[in-house]
Amino acid sequence: MSPMAIATTTSNLTAQGIASSVDKTAHSLVTESSSSNGVSNGNSTKAADAITNGAPKIVSNGTATPLPELSAARLNIALTSNPRTVPAAGSPEIASQKVCTDHMIQARWTVSHGWDAPSLQAYGPLSIMPTASVLHYATECFEGMKLYRGYDGKLRLFRPNLNCNRMLMSTNRIALPAFNPEELLKLIVKLCATDGAKWLPKDQPGAFLYIRPTMIATDSALGVQRPKEALLYVIMTMFPAMDTSSTLGGMKLLASKDDMVRAWPGGFGYAKVGANYGPSLVAQGEARAQGFDQILWLFGEKCNVTEAGASNFFVVWKTKEGKTQLITAPLGDKIILDGVTRRSVLELARTRLEKDGELEVVERKFDMFELEEAYVEGRLVECFVSGTAFFIAPISLINFRGKELNVDMKEGDMGTYTKTIKTWLRNIMWGKEQHEWGYVVEEKA
Ligand SMILES: *Cc1c(COP(=O)(O)O)cnc(C)c1O
């Protein structure tokens, strides 16, 4: 398979793409361990079995033993002996984003032994060598999700399977080991069930925790090579509600200058890998110093609009023909992230707004000059960003090479479409609307 073909299957996130990607890793491991004794193993169904059951299996033909897969059934639980107190709502500790819950999930992988049994253990420091691959070569990827305390008292995740699938896709992009995303989801759910009741009390509906699944390569050897050791961990942290406090009155975006790009075709902008974020912080720092909240990342000579900060970017405008359109950049070039919130906005807009003929939903390349023209001609209706961290945040201003586009905020704090879509999503996340996207976490009594 050519590298391009691999990238296509794994970024699809279809069930088939996932199975093939997990299978491929299981295989390459089998091949790697068996090639040393000159025996090849072409049995793909056995490896796939091992993956669906999550338990190691012995291949009966005696040529090779597939390595253990990541398996939530093997979880070892060691609860903390030092439970901490939960900081009060609105306290500076929460704003610091340093407070994590009592526990975390960890699972170690090595090329020779596959996945060790995962553990649920006290939250605390990691121990890695100064030579660890992640510290030198950015062999790291992560996810961002939230655990919501619903108005019906239940704990919910929002479409968590999409995050787990995307995590697999990201690990693929940077040579970290594959795993069955369903097993990752089970581990996340276990952590949520363990810490949820204490850290998201039932009498505080509307509260949430931020969940950060992470994978790092831990090889303690400086050679630049495919990782042979990795650590998967999941932590949960307290987070201020970013869509209300810092962005009240709308976010201000500074369009990136032509000497800096976030991502490029053939790169890794579509993967949630740490390497995308560190290098963007200089531009972000400059934007903040000038009074802006985020960078609006443009790409190419035509100044194509891609994403804003670590959020997807949407525009509502009227076309020259007078049609109302919701437009966002396409995923095809693989320079933007396939956001779970982005997908959800598009799906809700298609099923609830487009159907009624209210507006047309479009994923296509569009550029700053089109946006500017729409603004000058009074056709720019609303702009907003979408992402787990910022949720749905209205944009009040875009600065493009010194020119300012002031975006209307009809509802006082945001545009009408922005508000409608945000309310729909909020209702699903916090259980005001029962919807298949809301994944209920059963708590311990
Ligand atoms: C995480 C992220 C998003 C938002 O994705 P969600 O799944 O909606 O949280 C958008 N763009 C970038 C670059 C991101 O890292």
Image (cartoon, rainbow, N blue to C red):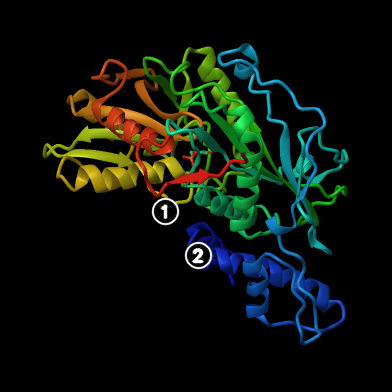
Residue 332 is tagged as 1
Compare marks 1 and 2 and give the one earlier in the sequence: 2
Above or below, 265 relative to 393: below
Separation of marks 1 and 2 at Cα, in angstroms: 19 Å
Q: Is residue 56 visible?
A: yes
- Point out the image quarter for the C terminus: top right
Tell me the kind of residue under disc 2: Ala
Residue 15 is tagged as 2
Q: Is residue 365 visible?
A: no
Above or below, 430 relative to 226: above
Q: What is the secondary structure assignment of the residue under circle 2?
A: helix
- Left of 31 or right of it: where is 416? left
- Left of 132 or right of it: where is 255? left
How many C-alpha atoms fall within 10 Å of the one at disc 1: few (<14), some, or many (≥20)? few
Q: Pinpoint residue 408: horizontal percent, then vertical percent.
A: 25, 20
Above or below, 348 relative to 203: below
Above or below, 161 relative to 38: above
How many C-alpha atoms fall within 10 Å of the one at disc 2: few (<14), some, or many (≥20)? few
Q: Residue at x 51, y 62 (%)?
A: 8
- Point out the image quarter for the N terminus: bottom right
User: Is 204 in front, or is 186?
Assistant: 204
Q: Pinpoint residue 258: horizontal percent, then vertical percent.
A: 47, 31
Q: Pinpoint residue 133: horizontal percent, then vertical percent.
A: 79, 46
Tell me the kind of residue under disc 1: Gly
